[in-house]
Image (tube, rainbow, N blue to C red):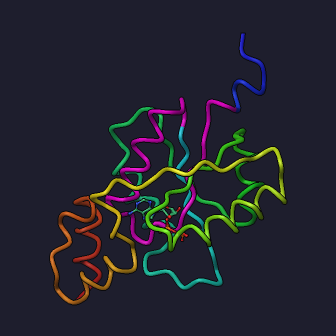
Amino acid sequence: MLNGLEKMRRTAVYPGSFDPPTNGHCDIIKRSAKLFDCLIVAVAENPAKKSFFSVEERVIMLREIVSEYGNIEVDHFDGLLVDYTENAGAVTIIRGLRALSDFEYEFELALMNRHLNATVDTIFMMTDEHYSFIRSSLVREVARLGGDISDKVPPVVEKYLKERLP
Ligand code: ADP
């Protein structure tokens, strides 16, 4: 019989803007889903940050991307990530690290989150070398300028970007 803590250990939350989801995100999602019984991919709603795709669109894209996996859920949240994580019954936040440039921001974020709620901890997954140069804003820019993004995002994201961009 599992106790409450054991159940919590089985779930992790992977939060992000995912504006849009890239193959780098997908790699982190798939690898994390092997480590935990349940992974919740949580799209952050941040009214202060103007997004390219709406939260609903990002959730739809992610749901399609993870549809073949039985242990991955897609959700969205506003407010504090640690509150969301605790309410989701988890004690683990997953974040991805590309280069040293990610480190400072991620380090601050993880420390702040632990300060806010010491029961929740952050685990970092190192990017796969194939995806280390991929970030959502750069993908949007390349797509806008007519460059090929087919090997940088899943097909559903490419479709959404093509529909949205002139
Ligand atoms: P944020 O949540 O800071 O707005 P993103 O939505 O772009 O950022 O990314 C969510 C998480 O995924 C972050 O931890 C980010 O570092 C990580 N990430 C983004 N792109 C990649 C990639 N290509 N490889 C590994 N991790 C990535």
The residue nearer to you, when weighing 95 against 41, is 95
- Up the image or down, 145 lies above or below 93; here it is below
10 in magenta: yes
Give percent across and percent down for residue 85: 70, 49
What residue is at 50 percent from the left and 33 percent from the top?
35
* Left or right of 12 in this view: 84: right
36 in magenta: yes
Give percent across and percent down for residue 149: 20, 72
* Left or right of 145 in this view: 5: right
- Up the image or down, 25 lies above or below 10; here it is below
What residue is at 69 percent from the left and 43 percent from the top?
88
- Up the image or down, 56 lies above or below 85; here it is below
**Where, quadrant-wise, is the C terminus in this rendering?**
bottom left
User: What range of the chain is rendered magenta?
Assistant: 9-38
The residue nearer to you, when weighing 75 against 129, is 129
* Left or right of 127 in this view: 151: left
What residue is at 65 percent from the left and 84 percent from the top?
48
